[in-house]
């Protein structure tokens, strides 16, 4: 197993020596990545990442609260219209298929109506 330094692509045989290398040569970037990763606040709506809780909170007030219920309602509306469209198409196709497969029967059905 070989370990590569992500910053300068140096190769190391053990994680420990890579860690030492990082600690000596890239101390700033290393602490930076360590600090950055856990301190990420993600907007629930648009998944945007924020390093500052306040910034995220302020963003979410604009992004999350006014949009989320509307978004869900429009999404549900969209799905419902799409579903009814599909149902329409299905019944139309079924009727067409019946007419194609059994032309005599459908003629009788129409006559009966
Ligand atoms: Zn390096
Ligand atoms: Zn957002």
Image (cartoon, helix red, strand yellow):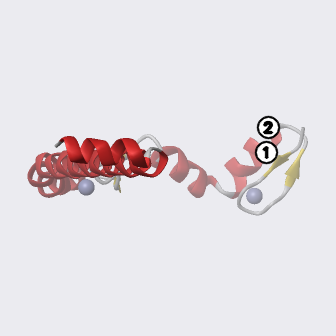
Q: Residue 4: percent from the left, percent from the top? A: 81, 51
Q: Horizontal placement of 64 versus 30: left or right? A: left
Find the residue positioned furthest to the bottom.
8
Find the residue positioned furthest to the left.
66
10 Å crowding of disc 1: few (<14), some (14-19), many (20+): some
Classify mark 1: helix, strand or loop. Answer: helix
Name the residue tied to disc 2.
Answer: 15
Compared with 112, 85 (above or below) is below
Q: Are marks 2 and 1 in contact (CB under 8 Å)?
A: yes
Residue 5: image quadrant is bottom right
The residue shown at (34%, 55%) is 48
Q: Horizontal placement of 74 versus 107: left or right? A: left
Residue nearest the viewer, comparing 2 with 62: 62
Question: Which corner quadrant holds the C terminus?
Answer: top left
The residue shown at (82%, 41%) is 17
Classify mark 2: helix, strand or loop. Answer: helix
Whole-number angstrom distance, CA of label 2 to CA of label 1 = 5 Å
Name the residue tied to disc 1.
Answer: 18
Q: Residue 111: percent from the left, percent from the top? A: 22, 46
């Amino acid at each position: 197993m070989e370990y590569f330094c992500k910053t300068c692509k140096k190769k190391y045989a053990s994680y420990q020596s890579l860690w030492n290398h990082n600690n000596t040569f890239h101390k700033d970037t290393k602490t930076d990545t360590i600090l950055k990763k856990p301190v990420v606040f993600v907007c629930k709506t648009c998944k945007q990442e924020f390093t500052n809780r306040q910034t995220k909170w302020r963003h979410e007030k604009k992004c999350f609260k006014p949009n989320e219920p509307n978004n869900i309602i429009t999404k549900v509306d969209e799905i419902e219209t799409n579903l009814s469209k599909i149902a329409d198409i299905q019944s139309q196709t079924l009727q067409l298929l019946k007419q194609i497969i059994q032309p005599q029967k459908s003629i009788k059905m129409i006559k009966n109506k």
